[in-house]
Amino acid sequence: MTRIAIATEGLTHCFGNFKAIDHIDLAISANTIYGFLGPNGSGKSTCMRLITGLLTPTRGKIRVLDMDIPTQAEALRLRIGYMTQKFSLYEDLSVIEHLRFIAQIYNLDNRYSTQRINEQLSAYGLNERSTRLVGSLSGGQRQRLALACATLHKPELLVLDEPTSAVDPENRRDFWEKLFDLCDQGTTILVSTHYMDEAERCHGIAILESGIKRADGSPSQLMKDLGAQVVEISGDNLRRLKQLLVAHENIISAAQQGTHLRVLIKEHVEKPQAWLQQEFADDMQGRELNLVRPSLEDVFVHCTGEGRQ
Amino acid sequence: MDKNLFGIHNSLQRIYAIMRKELRQLSRDRPTFGMIVMIPLIELLLFGFAINTNIRHLPVAIVDQSHSELARTLVADLGATQVVKFTYNYPTPSAAANAITRGDVRAALIIPKDIAQRLGDERPVAQWIIDGSDTMVGNAILTLKNMPLTNLTTQTLTNSNLTKSTFEMTLLYNPERRSAINIVPGLVGIILTMTMVLFTSAALVRERERGNLELLITTPIKPMELMIGKIVPYVFVGMIQMFIILGLGYLIFDVPVNGHIDQLLLATLVFISASLTLGMLISTFAKTQLQSMQLTVFILIPSILLSGFMFPYEGMPLLAQWIAETLPATHFIRLIRGIVLRAAQLTDLWPDFLWLASFTLLGLFVAAKRFKKRLD
């Protein structure tokens, strides 16, 4: 049986007249990595701030680690680690000074904190840089230090707001390895991203758009339940073909990927390749059409197609 | 050669682009925009209020040992000059001297038993004991030295070749009438206001600007803990500054420290705490470091002009005195001058000490209340 780490019910948050979060229900199992996938301004950060008690919801209920938020937000602080979207560590402290600072703020006892800091330094590959000033670290090193700080007090829940947006692909991969290690040790992780590949690594995701939850579930389930078919078309003049295709009501979207066009076709269309060749007979001549497995990006495009500005 | 890079027209256009951007940004920074108007306005008013070398109504005490009609007439005459205002009555000269030490009065008039005899002998009829530490105050009272005694000497009105002084003048604390004596201790107040308020006024704003605040508010730290933790280190900085100023004042300008060191430390401690708290309060209002700087200047200017540092408190109009009473520097300058120059005890100066202590506690409370560990 799974324990629920984060549960929200009808969670709504307004900034003035603007509904940043609109009736979001979540049930996030403990000991999993859960992702918020959505474009900028979709409410990912707001949702995380509500869950960590930094914002007070306009309506709705939040329970995190069996505590009522925001009433028990202060008690929750001891049990969660939070990594902000913007790098928020003190740049004029050294790596080890910063870790000691965090240890004291969280009241770790002296001997334990020394041992714990050493563990973190080697786990996050910062051993050789422990006396360097935080400001002089590279993007990847900063991110590792931020994670080391956020997990120093061994939080049960780790909240990461777009942790890899300023990190190169290799460091991103390493970063995710660390997240799986943490998850393996029993930590629940809530992460927001706008990278498909990252979202695909999560155990569960919620796709957010304009403050509304468009879909949620495991990435594989979402891809299976897409409700659309994907056809890849190759050939020349793809830009013109795209213009032509998207005008048709049965076609949800078309996106060029290098030398082929990836076309999302509504579910009710039977035999989409044949349908395309029939419907756009002139334009399909000499082109190769392949029915392919939907990707998470297709799911994303399908869910968020409407109402984007 | 690229014409776009070197043409005068293109150059002007680029300058124009920067100018428009600057003006746009300035007009969107409301507080800065307000300061542009407020600073000249306030400064003009403050200077107009404060600069008043024609000092009137200095509070003085009277010790009347003669209990005669003559003494009463003398007091009435002195009151009519408007230079002094008799606010206290003491039975003995030593009680009056204590009042000067406490800072209740700036001078005391001692009228001896034999005033009538002295008047006949054309000797000085009475004695002024003056707190000479502030030379401006001292000079104002010294102008009374040769005041003609027309109302007292009706019978000898014809005998107008009075060459002797009317009063015997005794200047305490600063007999050589050196202005450094008064300036140096006051400067401790001004410099501490400047540095202490500045240190903490930027404290929270800087964390917010650098994004560090978002880290702090997700930790278990409590607002009051954050405030105290940010204030205490600067107490030591302030103490060092106080020692530097008074030390150099002693070595270079020969300004003595007459009071007890423990009294001095205690007074400075409470003032530093009040100033740091004031800065912290500013920090909870300001949105940017620039704004916190401007607000600091806003505190600093009246602190220099109205606190009694440059111009005697008594010389200022009532409204300016009220403003002065709200500034920590005014209270501290009274304290430090009392302790350093007149060897006063904090028990003598307790109202100012109490004011600073209350300000600190209240200010910390308000700042901690205003600081929310929330983003909304």
Image (cartoon, rainbow, N blue to C red):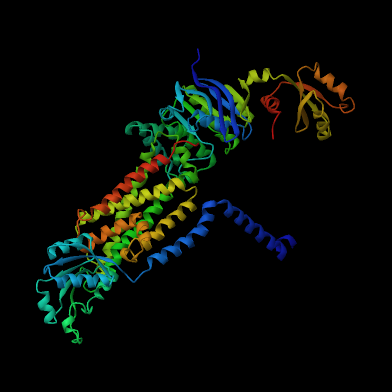
Report the number of discs.
Answer: 0
- Is B225 situated above or below A235? below
Is residue A236 rendered to the left or right of residue B171? right
Task: Report the front residue among A268 and B154.
Answer: B154
Task: Report the front residue among B204 and B164.
Answer: B164
- Is B271 situated above or below A275? below
Decide if residue A3 is in sight here.
yes
Is residue A81 rendered to the left or right of residue B63? right
Residue most toward the top? A1
Task: Report the front residue among A304 and B69.
Answer: B69
- Give the x, y percent position of residue B198: 41, 54
Task: Report the front residue among A203 and A94.
Answer: A203
Decide if residue A202 is in sight here.
no
- Give the x, y percent position of residue B104: 23, 60
- Give the x, y percent position of residue B16: 66, 60
Q: Residue at x 89, y 24 (%)?
A: A281
- Is A91 situated above or below B305? above
Is residue A21 rendered to the left or right of residue B183? right
Is residue B55 rendered to the left or right of residue A208? left
- Is B216 situated above or below A207? below
Residue most toward the right? A282
- Give the quarter of the image for residue A68: top left
- Give the quarter of the image for residue A297: top right
Name the quadrant of the N terminus of chain B.
bottom right
- Give the x, y percent position of residue B286: 47, 48
Q: Residue at x 66, y 25 (%)?
A: A296
